Amino acid sequence: MPNVPIYHAHLKDFHAQLTHILQGECDFSAAGVALYTADASNYRQIPLGVVYPQTVDDLVNTVTLCKTFSLPVLLRGGGTSQNGQGVNEAVVVDCSRYLTRVSDIDVENQTALVDPGVICDALKQQAEVYGLTFGPDPGTQSRCTLGGMIGNNSCGPHSMLAGKTVENVLQLEILTSDGARFWVGPTSVQELEKIVAGTDRRAVIYRELVSIRDEYQQLIRQRYPNIKRRVSGYNLDQLLPENDFNVARALVGSEGTCVTVLQARVKLIENPLYTRLIVLGFEDIYTAGDSVPEILPFAPIAMEGLDWGIIGGLTERNLKQAEIALLPEGQAWLMVELSANSADNLTQLCHEFETAMGLSKKVKSVLSVADAANTAAVWSIREQGASATAMSLNADDPDPVVGWEDTAVDPLQLGDYLREFSALIHRYGYTSSLYGHFGDGCIHARITFDTRSAEGISKWRNFSVEIAELVVQFGGSLSGEHGDGQAKGEFLPIMFGPELMHAFRRFKQIWDPEQRMNPGKLIDAYKMDENLRYGADYKLPETTTILHFKDDVGGFSRATERCIGMGKCRAQSGAMCPSYQATQEEKYSTRGRAHLLHEMVRGEVIKDGWDNKDIADSFEHCLSCKACKTECPTQVDIATYKAEFMAAHYAHKRRPLSHYPLAYIGNLLPKISRFSSVVNKLQTGITGQLAQKFLGLSDAKGLPKLAPQSFSGWARKNANRQDQQFLWFGEQDQPTVVLWADSVNNHYRPTLLQSAVNVLLKSGHQVAVAKQHFCCGRPLYEYGFLAQALKQLTFILDGFHSKLPSDCSVIVLEPSCLSVFKDELLSAFPYDTRALDLSERAKTLTRFLSDASITLAKQLSSGILHLHCHDKSLSISSHERDWMLRCFKDLQEPESGCCGMAGTYGLKKQTRAIGQRLFERRLKPAIDNAANDSVVVANGFSCFEQMMDGQSDRLVLHPVEIIEKCL
């Protein structure tokens, strides 16, 4: 283990012993604990340290050592808890890095044996091979762990089909806080008699559980709500005779306050094969709630509600507009999913349902969504809408936050409950969006609680008492999905009464007599207004930055608040976050970096600010792919934060010398390309090895070779004419387009720019190329040379933009350069009309051709398309894809995320291994398994370099070359 100072000095001996016995890892540094101060709730607590167990023995040994030192323990899943149960002043144990095995899938009995760190989606994917699935599917299923789901009793949209997690847990192997280890599950009368007759720790525990059952069983039957979504409290009902004294299920939903789960045997179900999404539109969300009883007889497997608060918030932020356009007429919607055992039966069921809904006086519109892509698009509104609107657009308005996010009532009373819930919200002067699992009566609401002032907190407390009383009045549950934690634990007596609260206290005492398992959560909980992440004593820190954060009122410090902890960046699919996908390390995730920065500006845990080396390391491992800017629901923009941090980090300290040539490569290329043959020769042999060592580059891949002649040189020789500013190709009476001669293609792949000239000429345009060298400065941002980057952008605005012919487009082939014009330029000069104009004019060749009259003469056979991360992240990839679909008879686009090269990332010794892992995850196998005549299409220079590495016989072309071949 590296000799890193620990944040809590009094834990020195514990840390020393722990590192000695662990096969896995632990991190007790300031940065290590800063990563885990927050989850997806309103709360913040500084952990003692973080443990990443590699084996079950690691897990056992950690908990045992914590007992020896009398330290509290928090077993944390994916860190997406919304009621505060995922943070504590405890030793945090994160199983999601290593304890991720699906040890067994029993197809015949439809069960699976899993580690606590298994991701829900990973289990689903393995089960789907056998036509099975794990039923619960929370919105965080791409990153939540089975251990976390068991702790929270998670559900999801399809709980109508499969129930909550508790209904899907068969057995648990558990470890008590005092070291007893055994399996629990349903217990027959005979087995129970045998267990309680014993003398071991298990016998003592079971005798106490029997005592609770016998004393409280009538009260449990009376006070527990008779609804599907009762998640609040402990599952004492599972100890009743009618539930087979099921100790495993009694522990589900205990939020880590009782035991450590070592393994779980869970139930699998048959995966519905024939499904259809039908969206119903309504005048308002209350009428949608009233309609639930009419829909339930059709046995939907999901029924999700969505009000205008979500849609309006997305529209204000110009998000999900294409998806929203798919919704039928209305101000509120129900997304109803039906299933059947055959295509014919599904068609018949959908016809009957649509007919009935069309006749209903409550329903305003009906839309059947048969297309898979449109179905996914509509679902994405429901999955991401609330998080995407989590930051208030008005600096004077509180952010919509969780806190009363998941109350649940009888779905047959849902409409009336929604009316009273909304009336209460309005009486307190709050605003909220309403959505949720209407088929099960579970309502989600992001409400504008003011947690940052004493007055606002007092008001929030009063509201909390009233909403708890309202839920109980409707026979509901304070939590219908996300658990109690700290947010609701205080209010459980309103729901259960003092006697059952005493029973809860006894239940925890049985398992955790020293009160060390996630203390202060669920039972004997902290007050709802303690440990607030943004409480009355929190003031937005002031920070001075080079870049403008105009979308964040409060600047950089406010930007660090964007991450609300939902952890979408920890998914193994999608473009975000590649460095996490390759390493499984929180510090290399979007969320991890955002949390580090936020703790940096707070200054409590990370005290050395911009000088912090751990944050620098985190950013040095960031690929600046920009995926988070669009895939993160709250648009956390790590690439921009990285540029700002690296600039400040090296403002007053000496940089590695290698930063200069790597960052200034765009400025150096025109000079060194004059001697291309000499430079290329020097790159081989001992000179090249020394150069790569000096630059910190891996010796596993050589540097790209300079072209014998640059595009600029070719253009000077072949242009039809020239003036003071431009070299011109084509007829003067044709409309004008300007081709941006980016630095890398200019000097490494000039034929691409030549092809662009040819294609543009054939499209009926004259082409202008700047005579003077301009560089967008993309690499400068990666290393934090912001002053130079802004200088070069100013040079472009003064020397390039000012000379542009009026109303002409600027064609940019290299996606990383185009992204500067679309992103960094506007960030640097947000109020400069020239910057806005250049940003609007800059476009891809395919975007430009989409508006031009050009006809393809032929199609190529088969291709594999990989688009640059910046294309995908800035949503400018659709035209590239559309044109390649026109150019190929068969085009495949593997879901690959980043290729792993990302400028110099895949070249540097520090990060090459990560880059290669990314390349080898999906993209390289897709290329290797493609037909021999398949053409690989990549529109980024770094992507091209990655694919050409070791590919001697595979053709890798740019879209412009493909289009040229097809004309």
Image (tube, grey):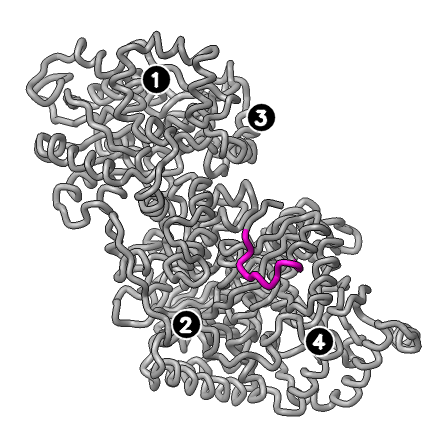
Calculate the distance from the C-alpha at mark 1 to the C-alpha at mark 3.
24 Å
Image-quadrant location for residue 219: bottom right
Q: Which mark is residue 656?
A: none
Which numbered dot is residue 514?
4
Question: How far apart, in angstroms, are the residues tagged by discs 2 and 1?
Answer: 53 Å
> The residue tagged with tag 1: helix, strand or loop?
helix
Q: Which residue is mark 2?
A: 434
User: Can residue 132 be seen by looking at this rendering?
Assistant: yes
Number of numbered tags placed on the structure image: 4
Residue type at tag 2: Leu
Q: Are marks 4 and 1 in contact (CB under 8 Å)?
A: no
Question: What kind of element bears circle 2?
Answer: strand
Residue corresponding to mark 3: 929
Where is residue 752? Give x, y as percent: 31, 19
- Residue 801 image offset from top left, x and y in percent: 13, 34
Quadrant, the N terminus:
top right
Cβ atoms under marks 1 and 3 closer than 8 Å: no
Q: Give amino acid for label 3.
A: Asn
